[in-house]
């Protein structure tokens, strides 16, 4: 398992694009609308090249968005995402290990438009929100 990206929740994706670019981050994707999760996302490589950031914004009204609670707290750093590899097993295996340690599944395995693969989110007892994305297949770029 390796870190895939850091998620940053925003109310306005266009404003965030400007801020990320001004900080020296480089867009590595277009805005991707994910109708299943009702969010728009865009990925940036940070100025050092070491991290990928995902900015996440509501597709609909903020009040009806799955991001509403996080945005009421001001948005910002939301989650870390790990990409599975062959030794990790399936997404379900990883979720079973997480729940055995007391984590709560907040988004069960679901298709993510941005990756073309399954993702899931857990909230750990510490309050950390962690996203897991299935291992890449041939041709996957994100």
Image (cartoon, rainbow, N blue to C red):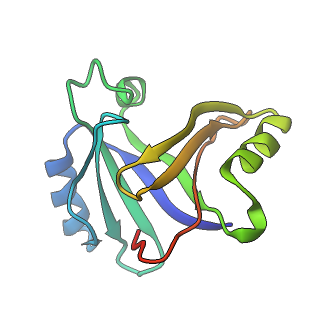
Q: Is residue 33 left or right of residue 86?
A: left
| Residue 63 vertical position relative to residue 89 in the rendered view, above or below | above
Q: Quadrant of the N terminus?
A: bottom right
Q: How far from the left and from the top, in percent, is residue 119? A: 53, 48
Q: How far from the left and from the top, in percent, is residue 36? A: 35, 36
- Identify the residue at image location x=59%, y=65%: 135
Who is closer to the viewer here, 87 or 6?
87
- Identify the residue at image location x=22%, y=52%: 16
- Identify the residue at image location x=42%, y=68%: 52
Q: Quadrant of the C terminus?
A: bottom left
Q: Is residue 125 left or right of residue 22?
A: right
Q: How far from the left and from the top, in percent, is residue 111? A: 45, 45
| Residue 48 vertical position relative to residue 108 in the rendered view, above or below | below
| Residue 135 vertical position relative to residue 37 in the rendered view, above or below | below
The quadrant where residue 49 appears: bottom left
The quadrant where residue 26 appears: bottom left
Q: Is residue 7 left or right of residue 38?
A: right
- Residue farthest to the top? 63
| Residue 79 vertical position relative to residue 35 in the rendered view, above or below | below
- Residue farthest to the bottom? 49
The quadrant where residue 2 appears: bottom right
Who is closer to the viewer here, 77 or 42?
42
Q: How far from the left and from the top, in percent, is residue 58? A: 27, 35
- Identify the residue at image location x=81%, y=32%: 102
Q: Is residue 68 left or right of residue 77?
A: left
- Residue farthest to the right? 100
């Amino acid at each position: 398992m390796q870190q895939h990206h850091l998620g940053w929740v925003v109310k306005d994706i266009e404003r965030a694009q400007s801020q990320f670019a001004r900080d020296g981050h480089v867009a590595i994707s277009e805005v991707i609308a994910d109708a299943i999760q009702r969010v728009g996302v865009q990925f940036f490589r940070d100025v050092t090249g070491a991290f990928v950031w995902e900015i996440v914004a509501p597709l609909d009204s903020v009040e009806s968005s799955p991001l509403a609670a996080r945005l009421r707290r001001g948005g910002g750093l939301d989650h870390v995402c790990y990409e599975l590899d062959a030794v990790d097993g399936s997404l379900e295996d990883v979720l079973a290990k997480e729940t055995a340690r007391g984590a709560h599944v907040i988004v069960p395995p679901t298709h993510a438009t941005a990756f073309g693969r399954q993702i899931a989110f857990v909230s750990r007892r510490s309050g950390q929100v962690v996203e897991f994305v299935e291992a890449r297949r041939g041709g996957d770029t994100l």
